[in-house]
């Protein structure tokens, strides 16, 4: 950066006076100084770091709650510091609000200055042009008037603004857009912040798992997880619903990329409101469904084996698809079945599903391929302690809380493990009942979200980029040309330039202008 | 050629260009050794009137140039061009090795391979305009080291692109991100040299040896600024525009404060700090250099560190299938 563009002088570091008005003015100048902006920027960068280290509620709530489980002493402290929600915490907000204030305090006066500067005429030529570091001198037979005319033409072509005609000199300036770009950039930063604010106030994001064939309607109670904006109201949810008609996925079977999934999509039968007729829509990764501003994304998939549990009396105690969450790339999946209405005691199953069953002595059962070529289940059996109701303290549908359960033992005294292929039935030990593996469905994991301000923020970023380009690459500079009589009919021409930003090739441009003056006819 | 053969070709090309980069380094050392033994005078007598006019970076090679030194310099340049070509072959064949054929940006090994290539390409593109011969040893040694680490630590066999990555925005986002990373990296080299040279000058050295061929501080600072000024808007576009748009398409939210995004933001803020620092009295020169280097550290940390330290916590983690991160509430 050159000396000319050095920005506001350092503010006095001592409060000059203790009268409230003076103090306020001093504080304002401190806050809107360039150095404060610099420090606030660093603070913002620093403050963002913890959010990448500590799991965030809003980013991955499952990991956040696991972390809390594992760190019993730290968790409450972190909770109070807002470390599980850094980007919504008061101290993070404090920093960027200060930046906003500083930004406004910076933009306003600079806009005024710019307003005046942008309409001012280029300053007159300095007395001694040859004092400037970039200058050229030559003599010519062309008359002084013609030389100046040529200079004007040259400079105009290069989009210089010319000062009104003055005897014997031309004064020109260009690059007014630099400061405009800079101002646009800073205003656009404000726009982005506002857009962000709108989204986090009014928007929401929710996740839901739907087994194919099942439906979903956009109500709070239907979500598996839901993160509302600060002033979001459930009544804002658009009243659409859909059924997952089908889910398709291709697994590459051979070659180096065997096992990789691709081309997945889901077909949904969508109703915009409860009364309307349904239309079929296909969603895939990178191609969401949009209903009245709310977007539905396909972000994952997995298996839901159909399992029927019969109790000791032969009655069906649980039946239907159970969602098993994938644990690795070959879709070994973990899940539970809760048959708590079974008689005489509740029955619980917990274990793994293998879409393509394989076994080795070292690893035990595993899945050899992610597609459901030879699906199998391997689960441990639990039963309720007599006189308790294990259903009363289950917090998650994907885990078995074993507080009120005991292992179901076989006659050998070990916990019973049932291994089932599709279509098979196994009798439970102790005559507790039976388990049947009826078949397999797939499920899709969907994310539903609405972020009202994101368009604003995006427009803001694009404007910021435009402003930035102007601010970094427009080269404000001044050029002066002066002519005088050199005797014997010749004209002495002096040309000089001044770069008001760094990095430009002023010397080259001055050369071009001078050559232009000498050549043009 | 089959996909397997392309993979082998790519690996061999990487080895070949690594050797070439080493030869570039040797050639530049030869150029330095054969330079004329005149005590190189510092070329820092750059006219500066009041008003501080920026003069285009002068070709500040210390002292006169001998024929032999010049000869070695040109050999170094030719070798760099060759190395870049072979490097490019390595990249292209890496993409052709995948089935189906794809852009070579599927994992960290490939990102690093591309990133180093971009450093060299940018260096060559600006070689003449900025008179960058003096940077050859730094660039070649840097690229060589990073390539070696890439092969030793990050190598992965070719695999196809995940669905989430199959979007034109991937190409746009990644091209911009790698371009910016390359330019920031070269800018960072200038900043490091600035600090080294400033320290040497303060101790009364720096006018001899390699540092003598490095431009004087003012030009160096301006050169660093120009690289950063180029990289910053590109990074803004990559990280704050293309990235969010792609994330919106793929994962349903523009900005999720995922660790990778957080660090991209931190990098952006630090470099914004750099641009401010250069316009703030008392922060120019070495302080601004330090800010730039902090920015570079956050950039590289984001590139390498996040995947290792935060692995599954980041949706951008190249190791884990997005689709297998299916977790229930
Ligand atoms: C969210 C906060 C801010 C961000 C992200 C930001 C970012 C930037 C960037 C990237 C530039 C470089 C463009 C250029 O060189 O022209 C810049 C320049 C500038 N900023 Fe900011 N800025 C912020 C806040 C502020 C504040 C609060 C002030 C006022 C004190 C300020 C004053 C300036 C000035 C005067 C320049 C021009 C420097 C020059 O002459 O090159 N900025 N800002």
Image: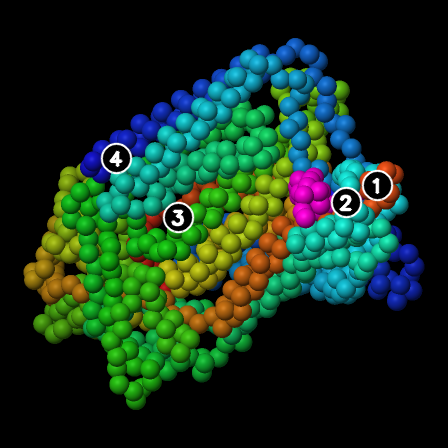
Q: Quadrant of residue A110?
A: bottom right
Decide which of A442, A26 is in the foreground and name it: A26
Q: CA distance from mark 4 to mark 3?
A: 26 Å
Q: Secondary structure at mark 1?
A: loop
User: Residue B317 has which mark?
Assistant: 3
Classify residue A2 as left or right of residue A65: right
The residue sitting at 34% across, 42% down in the picture is B104
Disc 1 from disc 4: Cα separation: 74 Å
Label located before the other in sequence (4 or 3): 4
- Residue that lies at the very extreme toward the bottom in this rendered image: A275
Q: Tell me which chain the residue with mark 3 is part of.
A: B
The residue that mark 4 highlights is B6
Q: CA distance from mark 4 to mark 2?
A: 67 Å
Rounded to the nearest angstrom, the CA distance separating label 3 from label 2 is 70 Å
Give the answer, above or below, for where A18 lies relative to B129: below
Which contiguous range is marked in magenta?
A: A493-521
Whether residue A132 is visible: no
Which of the two marks, 3 or 1, is nearer to us in this view? 1
State which quarter of the image contains the C terminus of chain B: bottom left
Question: Where residue B55 sits in the image (x, y, percent)?
Answer: 71, 37
Disc 4 and disc 2 in contact, CB within 8 angstroms:
no
Task: Give the vertical position of A244 relative to B287 (above or below).
Answer: below
Residue carrying label 1 = A489
Disc 1 + disc 2, Cβ < 8 Å: no
Tags 4 and 3 touching, CB below 8 Å:
no
Q: Quadrant of the N terminus of chain B?
A: top left
Q: Position of residue B312 (x, y in %)?
A: 39, 49
Residue A28 at least partly seen: yes
The residue that mark 2 highlights is A142
Judged from the image, the secondary structure of the residue bearing numbered disc 2 is loop
- In the rendered image, residue B192 lying in the magenta stretch gets the answer no
């Amino acid at each position: 950066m050159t000396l000319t563009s050095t920005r506001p002088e350092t503010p006095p570091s001592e409060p000059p006076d203790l009268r409230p008005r003076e103090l306020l003015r001093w504080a304002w100048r401190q806050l809107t100084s360039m150095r404060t902006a610099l420090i606030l920027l660093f603070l913002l960068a620093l403050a963002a770091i913890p959010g990448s280290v500590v799991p965030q509620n809003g980013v991955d709530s499952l990991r956040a709650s696991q972390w809390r489980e594992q760190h019993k002493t730290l968790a409450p402290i972190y909770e109070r510091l807002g470390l599980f929600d850094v980007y919504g915490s008061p101290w993070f907000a404090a920093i960027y609000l200060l930046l906003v204030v500083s930004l406004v305090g910076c933009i306003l006066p600079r806009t005024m200055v710019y307003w005046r500067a942008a309409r001012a005429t280029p300053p007159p030529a300095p007395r001694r042009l040859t004092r400037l570091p970039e200058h050229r001198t030559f003599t010519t037979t062309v008359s002084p008037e013609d030389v100046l005319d040529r200079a004007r033409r040259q400079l105009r072509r290069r989009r210089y603004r010319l000062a009104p005609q003055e005897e014997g000199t031309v004064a020109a300036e260009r690059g007014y857009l630099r400061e405009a770009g800079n101002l646009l950039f800073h205003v656009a930063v404000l726009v982005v912040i506002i857009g962000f604010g709108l989204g986090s106030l009014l928007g929401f994001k929710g996740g839901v798992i739907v087994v194919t064939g099942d439906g979903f309607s956009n109500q709070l109670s239907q979500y598996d997880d839901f993160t509302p904006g600060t002033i979001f109201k459930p009544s804002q949810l658009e009243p659409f619903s859909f059924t997952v008609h089908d889910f398709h996925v291709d697994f590459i079977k051979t070659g180096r990329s065997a096992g990789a999934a691709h081309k997945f999509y889901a077909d949904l039968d969508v109703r915009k409101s409860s009364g309307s007729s349904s239309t079929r829509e296909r969603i895939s990764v990178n191609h969401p469904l949009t209903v009245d501003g709310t977007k539905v994304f396909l972000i994952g998939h997995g298996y839901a084996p159909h399992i029927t549990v019969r109790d000791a009396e032969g009655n069906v105690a649980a039946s239907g698809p159970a969602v098993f969450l994938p644990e690795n790339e070959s879709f070994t999946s973990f899940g539970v079945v809760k048959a708590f209405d079974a008689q005489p005691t509740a029955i619980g199953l917990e274990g793994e599903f293998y879409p393509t069953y394989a076994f080795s002595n070292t690893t035990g059962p595993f899945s050899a391929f992610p597609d459901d070529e030879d699906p199998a289940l391997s689960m441990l059996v639990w039963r309720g302690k007599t006189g308790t109701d294990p259903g009363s303290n289950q917090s998650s549908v994907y885990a078995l809380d074993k507080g009120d359960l005991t292992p179901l033992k076989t006659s050998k005294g070990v916990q019973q493990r049932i291994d089932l292929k599709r279509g098979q039935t196994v009798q439970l030990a102790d005559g507790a009942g039976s388990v049947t593996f009826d078949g397999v469905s797939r499920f899709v994991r969907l994310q539903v979200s609405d972020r009202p301000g994101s368009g604003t923020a995006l427009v803001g970023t694009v404007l910021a980029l435009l402003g930035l380009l102007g601010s970094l690459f427009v080269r404000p500079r001044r050029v002066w040309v002066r002519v005088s009589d050199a005797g014997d009919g010749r004209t002495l021409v002096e040309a000089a330039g001044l770069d008001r930003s760094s990095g430009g090739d002023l010397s080259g441009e001055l050369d071009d202008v001078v050559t232009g003056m000498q050549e043009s006819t | 050629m089959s996909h397997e053969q392309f993979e082998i070709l790519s690996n061999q090309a990487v080895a070949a260009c690594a050797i070439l980069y080493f030869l570039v380094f040797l050639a530049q050392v030869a150029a330095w050794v054969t330079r004329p033994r005149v005590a190189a005078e510092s070329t820092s007598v750059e006219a500066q009137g009041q008003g501080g006019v920026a003069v285009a970076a002068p070709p500040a090679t210390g002292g006169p140039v001998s024929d032999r030194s010049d000869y070695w310099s040109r050999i170094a340049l030719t070798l760099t061009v060759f190395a870049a070509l072979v490097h490019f072959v390595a990249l292209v064949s890496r993409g052709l090795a995948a089935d189906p054929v794809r852009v070579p940006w599927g994992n960290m090994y490939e990102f690093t391979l591309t990133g180093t290539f971009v450093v060299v390409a940018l260096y060559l593109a600006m070689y003449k305009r900025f008179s960058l011969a003096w940077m050859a040893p730094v660039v070649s040694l840097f690229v060589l080291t990073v390539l070696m680490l890439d092969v030793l630590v990050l190598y992965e066999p070719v695999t196809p692109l995940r669905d989430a990555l199959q979007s034109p925005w991937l190409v746009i986002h990644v091209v911009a991100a790698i371009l910016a990373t390359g330019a920031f990296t070269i800018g960072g080299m200038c900043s490091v040299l600035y600090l080294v040279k400033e320290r040497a000058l303060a101790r009364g050295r720096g006018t001899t040896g390699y540092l003598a061929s490095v431009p004087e501080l003012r030009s160096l600072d301006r050169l660093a600024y120009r690289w950063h000024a180029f990289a910053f808007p590109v990074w803004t576009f990559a990280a704050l525009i293309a990235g969010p748009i792609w994330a919106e398409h793929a994962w349903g939210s523009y900005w999720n404060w995922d660790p990778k995004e957080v660090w991209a933001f931190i990098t952006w803020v630090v470099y914004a700090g750099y641009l401010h620092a250069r316009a703030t009295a008392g922060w120019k020169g070495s302080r601004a250099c330090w800010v730039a280097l902090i920015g570079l550290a956050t950039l590289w940390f984001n590139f390498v560190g996040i995947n290792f330290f935060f692995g599954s916590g980041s949706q951008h983690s190249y190791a884990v299938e997005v689709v297998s991160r299916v977790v229930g509430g």
